[in-house]
């Protein structure tokens, strides 16, 4: 049995498993969706893709090759928005592993993301129009739009999903629009999806890079009754943009998280010092800690680790962490758990003190 | 003592970091003092986040052993943790005890409170070190079971009783397979005490071991049945000869129970293995298959009269199929709760019973183990095959330092019958090299060793003979088909043994320690095949094959009990020689005799010998040995007609022995011709194990023939049948024929004997006076003498 099979495949039927894979600066989440009564009855869905060359980042292709060594296949790729750290490497995943459907937010990014966006366009083209679907906010469960922009109900195995965003598609080209403005507009219309499972239902909220404007203007008020989720995937790698326009914004928005009421928060970001954008932002972390207990917050880059969420048929949820996927499929591992002097906060003194020599005043003559 | 973390600083660093960074264990304090310990919470993230405080203590054997994990009732302060770290593991275990959370109903917590949830050794991979990561994961999964009720699967079966927090240290209970008889469902069970050890230097309390000797109970139709039992060999009590005596002699029974020589319990069949539990109420509920009331009702008829008196403790047993589906019998002691013990009078039985039951609370699991021939010998499998060895009989001649240990090895291997021969008593100075201890001083050695053999393997039948073997005929003593191992190391006595054994065609192994135990000489004598004891004495002078071992003159000469000079030797050498001898004997018993018959072991370099190597060789019988070199192969001719006469007699009743005398003559080539065989005669004795001819009848038969044949046809020998398929001569047969060969009245010094199996298959042996007997060629193809 390969490590991927051991960690990712449920050992019994009827478990909805979500694996937040460690990918450094970016996001890749694997949904393992129950689709029948057998122990092998599972659909595999990749939600965003980030494959570049960051330390410890799990190599999706190596991992999938091992995962599907004897059984199973990747069926769907869902993209929240077409930015590099959410679509990276998807062409290679398609070529080496393959999948048959693409669901996406139907935006066109700015020139910075052009290369990787070409990759997304390549796989969309490959799967064909009939297997391409658009995300669009709706109050209905399991509703997507066809590539001809028609509403259709489409089940994902035995779970339910609800698309909360985007509210509209950004396909226009504004000639003098700069990169940052366009990025911000896409974040305002980023895909947001809630996945739900269990007879006592539990939900996981996937937020992509959706920002304050997205929630304040398009999501919270429209879907306020449907927001509650025990697991929240922190938007934009723990960026403050979830709460504020920028660092100086005094008008902090918290209504969304007050209604989501998460017990668990997953932040897909490297260690803060390794993030080009300083993710997760300190002020955002402070805000998150107001709403989620410290032991419910998982910052993937901290150790690093991946987070696995299991929801069973009864709705019993279990959250665990895993390092084996990183140890096996991570790139350039330096994960010896040692000489780590970064952000371990209050534990740092304890363990250094326990590990090193303690001196006393032995006289010498 | 250098602390483990000074020897393994890297391991400390890794463990320390991992403890500080684990997502499943939120560390609060980590202290390195005399001990390295960590305290924090196991974090379990389900619908909400659950916390379980634990203490992790790294013992001195880290990293070769796993850290100790104590589940706690609540978190400790930094000060408390620092104080704990100053202690050693033993003192810490005491200090932490009041803070430990005990999960009485769960497996995998020792009575010390430590969780035992990881195996850490594998036969295949050898030992490997587990990091704290995998340990924490396992602890997390176990604690998760506390919330969800689903525990990680056990990877290895552990005895049921060992999951209890309270295990009775004083009593052990072994039970035979008959205790698992499925026809009965509830009833009484008895165990006899086979060992009692008072408090001692190494034990803080007395200990008793019991062996299940009788089980009775109701079957499905409510009818009482007792299961057929033979009492264990180690149980001896005046007035008790079998298990039914125990049950029927009420007064004696009560006396035995009172003196704790006998243990009595009631027992109940339940449907499945219960979870461990803490108190009597839970046990009653288990007996009631989930209902406390049903349990009370089921137990009352059995326990009412006993519990009315509210004794200090009572025994209760349950029987169930364990998680592997194998039936188990488990005994508990339930102890009286001091505060509540008034005796009720004049109240209805049910009320009295409920009241009495309330006087008991704490339950101790008694260590129970199924004990059968099969399970007992399991660990010998492949090296000592009980199935083969159970059929064998061995005489251990001389049970001194070597003989006692050889007997013990053979006994533990499961040889079916062992007979011990020794006429000396154990002196207080013997145990320094002997199997028996000082407590057996003054016992005949054979009896002392028999005691110990019985204790080491109750499934072996041990016989004892304390005679001087120089004064008895060994054929009287040695079981038919037995082989012997001699370690007497006395040339004269072994010379005599050799003579008797060679004449009787018995195999003997001789084992001797030489040069203070530094050298051993072990040899086998299969008469006619191997050099016998006498042959070797002849070989000693002149044969290049014979390795002579001279005495070590540097060792002092001591005197033994018989004032004979001996050299000292230590148990380290003698046990090794005993084991070596035993291994050679066991191999030959199991695999057939080897081509070698002479083995010399040496721990020092001597001419022809390398240190710590076994020299093996084959030494042939000596050409001039009186005992060995006498075979002149003669043919015995029996005409078909004579043969038929004998076979007809056998076929008339092949379940008892029959026989008669043989008459004939010796031809010019020395061949023996049987011309006539007599019948048994009307006054003969014919049983399944014995035949005695009618002397008058046979005498007349011979006398008449002698006259009729003109003094040509005379007595040649004897014939008889065995009521089984064995047509080899028995000890009695050999003894009689040997006597015939010697006795002047018989007028022959080479009597022959023909023995038939129960299907009429003959064997013919020739018994020359003073030499070993041998099988003759038998010619039965001649039609008649005419």
Image: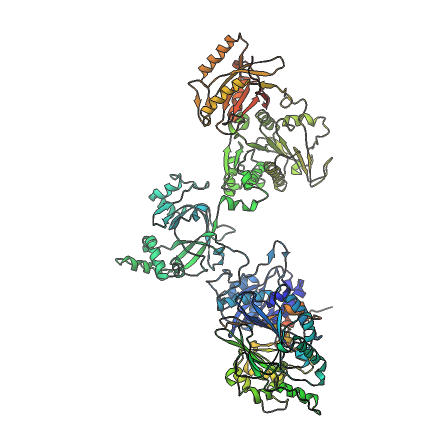
Residue farthest along the left direction in this orientation? B346
- In x, y percent, where is residue B553? 69, 34
Instruction: Please tell me whether residue B485 is drawn above or below residue A1 in the rendered image.
Output: above
Between B490 and B315, the one lying in front of the other is: B315
Does any portion of residue B132 appear in the rendered image?
no
- In x, y percent, where is residue A109? 68, 84
Q: How many marks?
A: 0
Does any portion of residue A109 appear in the rendered image?
yes
Between B140 and B654, the one lying in front of the other is: B654
Task: Name the quarter where the N terminus of chain B is drawn.
Answer: bottom right
Corner quadrant of residue B45: bottom right
Corner quadrant of residue A282: bottom right
Task: Name the quarter where the C terminus of chain B is drawn.
Answer: top right
The answer to whether B717 appears left or right of A359 in the picture is: left
Between B351 and A152, the one lying in front of the other is: A152
Between B769 and B717, the one lying in front of the other is: B717
- In x, y percent, where is residue B656? 45, 26
Instruction: Please tell me whether residue B743 is drawn above or below residue A38 in the rendered image.
Output: above
Q: How is the image coloured?
A: rainbow
Corner quadrant of residue B593: top right
Instruction: Please tell me whether residue A140 is drawn above or below residue B98 in the rendered image.
Output: below
- In x, y percent, where is residue B393? 54, 34
């Amino acid at each position: 049995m390969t490590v991927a099979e051991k960690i990712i495949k449920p050992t019994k039927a009827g478990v909805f498993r979500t694996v937040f894979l460690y990918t450094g600066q970016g996001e890749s989440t694997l949904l393992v969706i129950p689709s029948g009564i057998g122990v092998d009855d599972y659909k595999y869905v990749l939600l965003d893709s980030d494959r570049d060359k960051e330390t410890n980042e799990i190599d999706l292709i190596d991992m999938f090759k091992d995962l599907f060594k004897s059984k199973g296949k990747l069926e769907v790729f869902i993209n929240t928005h077409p930015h590099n750290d959410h679509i990276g490497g998807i062409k290679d995943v398609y070529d080496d592993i393959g999948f048959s459907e693409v669901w996406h937010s139907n935006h066109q990014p700015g020139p910075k993301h052009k290369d990787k966006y070409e990759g997304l366009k390549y796989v969309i083209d490959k799967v064909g129009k009939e297997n391409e679907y658009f995300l669009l906010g709706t109050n209905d469960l399991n509703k997507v739009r066809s590539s001809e922009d028609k509403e259709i109900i489409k089940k994902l195995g035995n779970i339910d999903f609800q698309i909360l965003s985007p509210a509209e598609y950004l396909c226009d080209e504004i000639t003098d629009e700069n990169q940052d403005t366009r990025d911000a507009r896409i974040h305002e219309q980023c895909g947001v999806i809630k996945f739900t499972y269990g007879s006592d239902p539990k939900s996981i909220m996937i937020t992509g890079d959706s920002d304050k404007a997205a929630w304040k203007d398009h999501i919270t008020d429209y879907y306020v009754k449907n927001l509650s989720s025990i697991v929240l995937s922190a938007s934009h790698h723990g960026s403050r943009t979830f709460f504020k326009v920028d660092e100086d914004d005094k008008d902090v928005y918290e209504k969304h998280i007050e209604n989501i009421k998460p017990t668990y928060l997953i932040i897909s970001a490297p260690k803060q010092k390794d993030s080009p954008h300083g993710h997760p932002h300190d002020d955002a972390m402070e805000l998150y800690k107001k709403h989620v207990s410290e032991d419910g917050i998982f910052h993937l880059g901290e150790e690093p680790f991946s987070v696995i969420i299991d929801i069973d048929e009864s709705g019993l949820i279990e959250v665990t962490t895993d390092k084996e996927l990183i140890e096996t499929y991570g790139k350039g591992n330096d994960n010896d758990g040692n000489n780590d002097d970064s952000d371990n906060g209050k534990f740092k003194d304890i363990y250094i003190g326990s590990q090193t020599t303690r001196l006393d005043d032995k006289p010498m003559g | 003592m250098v602390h483990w973390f000074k020897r393994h600083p890297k391991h400390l660093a890794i463990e320390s970091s991992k403890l500080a960074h684990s997502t499943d264990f939120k560390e609060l304090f980590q202290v390195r003092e005399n001990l390295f310990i960590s305290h924090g919470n196991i974090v379990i993230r389900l619908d909400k986040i659950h916390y379980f405080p634990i203490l992790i203590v790294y013992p001195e054997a880290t990293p070769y052993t796993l850290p100790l994990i104590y589940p706690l009732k609540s978190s400790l302060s930094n000060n408390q943790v620092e104080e704990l770290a100053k202690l050693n593991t033993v003192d810490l275990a005491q200090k932490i005890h009041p803070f430990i959370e005990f999960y009485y109903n769960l497996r995998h917590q020792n009575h010390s409170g430590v969780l035992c949830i990881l195996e850490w050794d594998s036969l295949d991979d050898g030992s490997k070190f587990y990091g704290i990561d995998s340990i924490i994961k396992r602890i997390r999964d176990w604690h998760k079971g506390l919330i969800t009720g689903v525990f990680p699967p056990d990877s290895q079966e552990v005895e049921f009783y060992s999951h209890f927090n309270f295990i009775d240290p004083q009593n052990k209970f072994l039970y035979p397979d008959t205790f698992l008889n499925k026809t009965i469902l509830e009833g009484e069970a008895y165990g006899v005490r086979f060992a009692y050890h008072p408090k001692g230097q190494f034990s803080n309390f007395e200990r008793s071991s019991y062996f299940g000797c009788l089980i009775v109970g109701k079957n499905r139709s409510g009818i009482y049945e007792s299961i057929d039992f033979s009492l264990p060999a180690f149980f001896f009590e005046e007035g008790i000869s079998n298990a039914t005596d125990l049950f029927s002699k009420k007064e004696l029974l009560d006396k035995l129970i009172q003196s704790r020589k006998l243990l009595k319990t009631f027992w109940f069949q339940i449907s499945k293995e219960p979870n461990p539990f803490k108190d009597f109420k839970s046990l009653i509920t288990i007996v009631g298959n989930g209902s406390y009331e049903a349990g009370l009702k089921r137990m009352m008829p059995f326990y009412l009269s006993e519990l009315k008196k509210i004794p200090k403790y009572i025994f209760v047993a349950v029987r169930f199929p364990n998680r592997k589906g194998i039936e188990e019998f488990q005994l508990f002691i339930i102890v009286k709760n001091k505060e509540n013990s008034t005796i009720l009078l004049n109240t209805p039985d049910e009320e009295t019973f409920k009241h009495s039951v309330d006087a008991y609370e704490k339950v101790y699991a008694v260590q129970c183990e199924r004990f059968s021939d099969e399970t007992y010998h399991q660990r010998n499998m492949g090296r000592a095959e009980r199935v083969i060895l159970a059929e064998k009989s061995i005489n251990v001649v001389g049970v001194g330092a070597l003989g006692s240990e050889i007997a013990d090895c053979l006994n533990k291997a499961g040889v079916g019958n062992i007979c011990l021969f020794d006429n000396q008593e154990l002196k207080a100075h013997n145990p320094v090299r002997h199997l028996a201890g000082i407590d057996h001083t003054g016992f005949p050695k054979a009896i002392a060793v028999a005691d110990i053999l019985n204790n080491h393997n109750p499934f072996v039948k041990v016989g004892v003979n304390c005679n001087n073997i120089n004064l008895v005929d060994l054929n009287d003593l040695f079981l038919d088909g037995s082989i012997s191992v001699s370690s007497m190391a006395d040339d004269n006595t072994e010379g005599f043994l050799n003579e008797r054994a060679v004449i009787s065609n018995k195999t003997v192994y001789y084992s001797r320690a030489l040069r203070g135990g530094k050298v051993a000489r072990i040899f086998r004598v299969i008469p006619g095949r191997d050099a016998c004891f006498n042959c070797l004495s002849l070989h000693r002078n002149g044969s290049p094959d014979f390795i002579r071992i001279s005495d070590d003159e540097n060792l002092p000469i001591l005197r033994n009990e018989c004032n004979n000079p001996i050299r000292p030797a230590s148990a380290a050498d003698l046990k090794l020689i005993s084991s070596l001898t035993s291994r050679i004997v066991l191999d030959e018993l199991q695999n057939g005799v080897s081509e070698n018959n002479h083995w010399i072991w040496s721990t020092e370099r001597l001419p022809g010998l390398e240190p710590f190597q076994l020299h093996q060789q084959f030494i042939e019988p000596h050409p001039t040995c009186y005992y060995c070199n006498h075979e002149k192969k003669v043919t015995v001719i029996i005409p078909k007609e004579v043969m038929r006469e004998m076979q007809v007699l056998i076929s008339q009743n092949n379940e008892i022995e029959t026989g008669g005398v043989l008459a004939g003559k010796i031809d010019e080539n020395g061949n023996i011709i049987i011309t006539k065989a007599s019948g048994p005669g009307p006054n003969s004795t014919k049983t399944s194990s014995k035949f005695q001819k009618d002397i008058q009848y046979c005498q007349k038969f011979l006398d008449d023939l002698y006259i009729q044949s003109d003094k040509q046809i005379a007595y040649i020998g004897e014939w008889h049948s065995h009521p089984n398929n064995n047509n080899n001569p028995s000890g009695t047969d050999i003894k009689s024929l040997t006597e015939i060969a010697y006795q002047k009245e018989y007028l022959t010094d080479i009597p022959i004997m023909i023995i038939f199996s129960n299907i009429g298959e003959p064997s013919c042996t020739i018994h020359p006076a003073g030499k070993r007997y041998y099988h003759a060629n038998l010619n039965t193809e001649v039609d008649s003498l005419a």
